[in-house]
Amino acid sequence: MMDKVIHLLKENNMSVPRILMYNYKKLELSEKEFIILIYIINEKNLNFNPKEISQNLNLSLPEILEVIDSLSTKDLIKIELKKVNNVREEFINLDNLYNKLAYLVVNDETISNSAKQSSNVFDIFEKELGRTLSPMEYEIINGWIDVPFSEEIIIAALKEATYNGVSNLRYIDKILYEWKKKGIHSKEDIEKDRRQFQSKKIESKPLFDYDWLNDNE
């Protein structure tokens, strides 16, 4: 089973970026490491050329070397020497990364199923916001799912925010936790809360102040 998953990952028949998106924190990757790793994965030529990576990602050479060293320390990549036309060249070996990703896919069914179930949430967010979500935004939404907030309530909070002209996930986060404090867990609860709010507004409306005693008419 593990060998098949590794083969699929290497052949790009599975979405490696999507798998990393859901699991990069479990691999203890920083966002910079995540970005550079995605770059390496999508390069057909795994010849190690830090200057080229630096230019393409607009990061300094020391930054690239620091990240590569960190990825090697975390045992996700290896820099190997190979002879090409009698010349020794450095290549990036991603086998350890594929092994760890395969382990997560095979052994962590809960995360895998959660990722499939919640993919609709991410698609709706990207459609509603009109842009691709950042890794940090994926992490925030995953945090809501882990609380857990239902898919229904997360999307309702998104709709509430966009209705108010706000596309900030921090604002949506405040809506969700405010609803949680009120015990709101569904669309029906939201409608009930709104009706109660409107009712209180009507009840608190001051009565017409009329001085009957001094009415001379």
Image (spheres, rainbow, N blue to C red):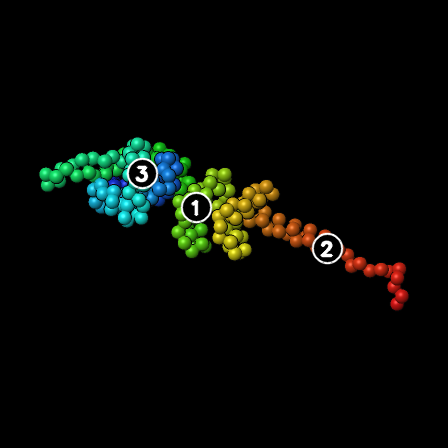
Residue receiving disc 3: 67
The front one of 62 and 79 is 62
Where disc 3 sits, the SS reads helix
Q: Earlier in the sequence, mark 3 or mark 2?
A: 3
Instruction: Identify the secondary structure beneath mark 2.
Output: loop
Q: Which of the 4 quarters of the picture holds residue 47?
A: top left
Q: Is residue 160 above or below residue 147?
A: below
How far apart are the alpha carbons under marks 3 and 2?
62 Å
Q: Nearer the viewer, mark 1 or mark 3?
A: 3
Q: For the N terminus, give its image quadrant.
A: top left
Q: Earlier in the sequence, mark 1 or mark 2?
A: 1
Between the residue at mark 1 and the residue at mark 2, the CA separation in whole angstroms equals: 42 Å
**What is the quadrant of the C terminus in the image?**
bottom right
Work out whether 37 lies above or below 160. Answer: above
Query: Residue 114: image x %, image y %?
Result: 42, 40
- Above or below, 206 against 217 in this view is above
Residue drawn where x is 34% and y is 40% of the image: 33
Say which amino acid is labelled 1.
Glu
Q: Earlier in the sequence, mark 1 or mark 3?
A: 3
Residue 14 visible in this rendered orientation of the protein: no
Residue 54 found in image quarter: top left
Q: In the image, residue 128 lies at what x, y percent?
A: 45, 54
Residue carrying label 1: 137
106 left or right of 165 in image: left
Residue 97, image x, y percentages:
29, 36
Task: Tell me, yes or no, whether the two marked residues, 1 and 3, touch with CB atoms within 8 Å.
Answer: no
Q: Residue at left 54%, top 52%?
A: 160
Which is more toward the observer, 208 or 54?
54
Task: Give the residue type that dot 2 points to.
Answer: Lys
